[in-house]
Image (cartoon, rainbow, N blue to C red):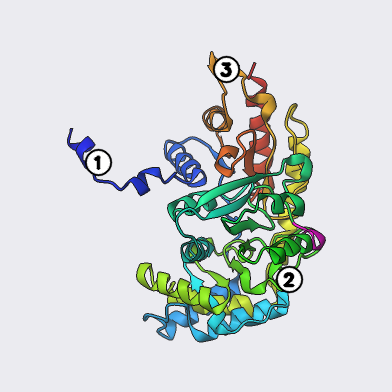
């Protein structure tokens, strides 16, 4: 009775907020490991590499120099300047520190931008599959998610014509990632150019370009969306250090936007979290000023090799359909063949059922595709060793053969 009464005090807003499926699967994986079960975790998007030594040394130096006090909300000025330098060097984008906000991870940067832009009832287009938190953030801000689905036959990339057809007078924002989490798809320069033309023709529409996987691209380097046409003032470019520099626990992301949006995000962040860790900020300067190929190219090459291994092994499993992901460290197989099958009288109804079956029977943690807006898919992260990849996919294959 008391528990029910307590629950009634929670806001409707938080009760409607979904839990991150990636974090939920990671938690279940940890719980099983604590019981002594050998679980291969392929659910989290976390590089298994350690942070490069020169970045750690910069952090140690910062500690020794007593960078232990509050910093300006958007970040140290020399860090903002380093981000401007990186954006000019790598992306051909001209910004000043007034355009940059540093946050506690790219996730917060995206949330800040959504809350700065979205009013109740505004429509937000989400090319699907989308990263798990986009939809929940939009709904939490009072926006209306508009799902724009492109299947595996299109490499999960809606065309410019499909994007334009989804835009209405109520559309305020588009959010997408390239390289994409969860599909690994990378938009080509030609595709981005066509999207930019759509945004040009619709001056009431803004777009968040999530480029957190920029450095994990196995083909030709893509341009930033903000570098096309005359749309830079309406593009919020989000990036960070977690994926490309193996700094997930350091928690630093950043956005580049027009000054009005940046100032709004500064205001929001000042009330919620203030600045990110001072030591992380000093380490970030070292990361951003380094040659990215020299600092992180070996990680990308390892992920590329792992992708090819995982695809080869998955191709040996009947009924799985895969695309060729050109970036990030995910494969997003289509698993319709296994939905509706049974094991011990239990029906595998959806991707979550399939993932729960695999973690309990195969002891492999992967993420349901429903969390990304496509329930006939699963997301497999290959950000782990080749031995673990081989073991996990061998277990998955064995477990799937038991379904009838």
SS at badge 1? loop
Instruction: Classify the position of the N terminus by image quarter.
Output: top left
Q: Main secondary structure of the magenta part?
A: helix
Q: Is residue 190 on the magenta stretch?
A: yes
Q: Earlier in the sequence, mark 1 or mark 3?
A: 1
Q: Earlier in the sequence, mark 2 or mark 3?
A: 2
Q: Measure the C-alpha gap from mark 2 to mark 1.
A: 53 Å
Q: Residues within 10 Å of mark 2 (few under 14, many from 20)?
A: few
Q: Which residues are magenta?
A: 187-191
Which residue shows up at 74% across the image and 60% down it?
195
Q: Is residue 371 above or below residue 169?
A: above
Q: Is residue 146 left or right of residue 25?
A: right
Identify the residue at the far left of this view: 2
The residue under label 1 is 8
SS at badge 3? strand
The residue under label 2 is 293
Which residue shows up at 59% across the image and 41% down it?
373
Which label belongs to residue 343? 3
Q: Nearer the viewer, residue 324 or 26?
A: 324
- Image quadrant assignment for residue 189: bottom right
Q: Earlier in the sequence, mark 2 or mark 1?
A: 1
SS at badge 2? helix
Q: Are marks 2 and 1 in contact (CB under 8 Å)?
A: no
How many marks overall?
3
Q: Measure the C-alpha gap from mark 2 to mark 3.
A: 48 Å
Identify the residue at the far top of this view: 345
Image coords of residue 291 (percent x, y) = 70, 77
């Amino acid at each position: 009775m008391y528990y029910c009464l307590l629950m009634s005090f929670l806001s409707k807003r938080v009760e409607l907020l979904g839990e991150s499926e990636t974090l939920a699967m990671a938690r279940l994986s940890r719980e099983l490991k604590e019981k002594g079960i050998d679980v291969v975790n392929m659910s989290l998007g976390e590089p298994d590499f350690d942070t490069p030594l020169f970045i750690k040394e910069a952090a140690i130096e910062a500690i020794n120099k007593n960078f232990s006090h509050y910093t300006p909300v958007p970040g140290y000025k020399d860090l903002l300047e380093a981000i401007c330098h990186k954006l000019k060097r790598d992306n051909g984008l001209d910004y000043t520190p007034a355009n940059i906000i540093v946050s506690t991870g790219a996730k917060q940067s995206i949330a800040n931008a959504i809350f700065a832009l979205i009013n109740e009832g505004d429509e937000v287009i989400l090319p699907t599959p989308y990263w798990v938190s986009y939809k929940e953030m939009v709904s939490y801000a009072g926006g209306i998610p508009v799902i724009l689905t492109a299947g595996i036959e299109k490499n999960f990339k809606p065309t410019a014509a499909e994007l334009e057809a989804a835009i209405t007078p109520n559309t305020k924002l588009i959010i997408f990632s390239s390289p994409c989490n969860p599909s690994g798809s990378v938009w080509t320069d030609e595709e981005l150019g066509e999207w930019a033309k759509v945004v040009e023709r619709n001056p009431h529409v803004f777009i968040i370009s999530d480029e957190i996987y920029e450095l994990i691209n196995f083909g030709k380097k893509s341009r930033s969306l903000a570098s096309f046409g005359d749309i830079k003032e309406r593009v919020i470019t989000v990036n960070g250090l977690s994926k490309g520099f193996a700094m997930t626990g350091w928690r630093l992301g950043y956005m580049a936007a027009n000054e009005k949006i940046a100032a709004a995000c500064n205001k929001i962040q000042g009330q919620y979290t203030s600045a990110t860790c001072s030591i992380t900020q000093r380490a970030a300067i070292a990361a951003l000023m380094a040659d990215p190929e020299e600092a992180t190219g070996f990680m990308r090459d390892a992920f590329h090799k792992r992708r090819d291994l995982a695809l080869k092994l998955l191709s040996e499993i009947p009924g799985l359909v895969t695309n060729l992901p050109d970036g990030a460290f995910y494969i997003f197989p289509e698993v319709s063949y296994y939905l509706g099958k049974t094991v011990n009288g239990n029906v595998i109804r959806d991707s979550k059922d399939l993932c729960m079956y695999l973690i309990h029977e195969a002891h492999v943690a992967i993420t349901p595709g429903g969390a990304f807006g496509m329930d006939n898919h699963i997301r497999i992260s290959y950000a782990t060793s080749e031995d673990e990849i081989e073991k996990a996919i061998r277990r998955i294959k064995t477990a799937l053969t038991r379904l009838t």
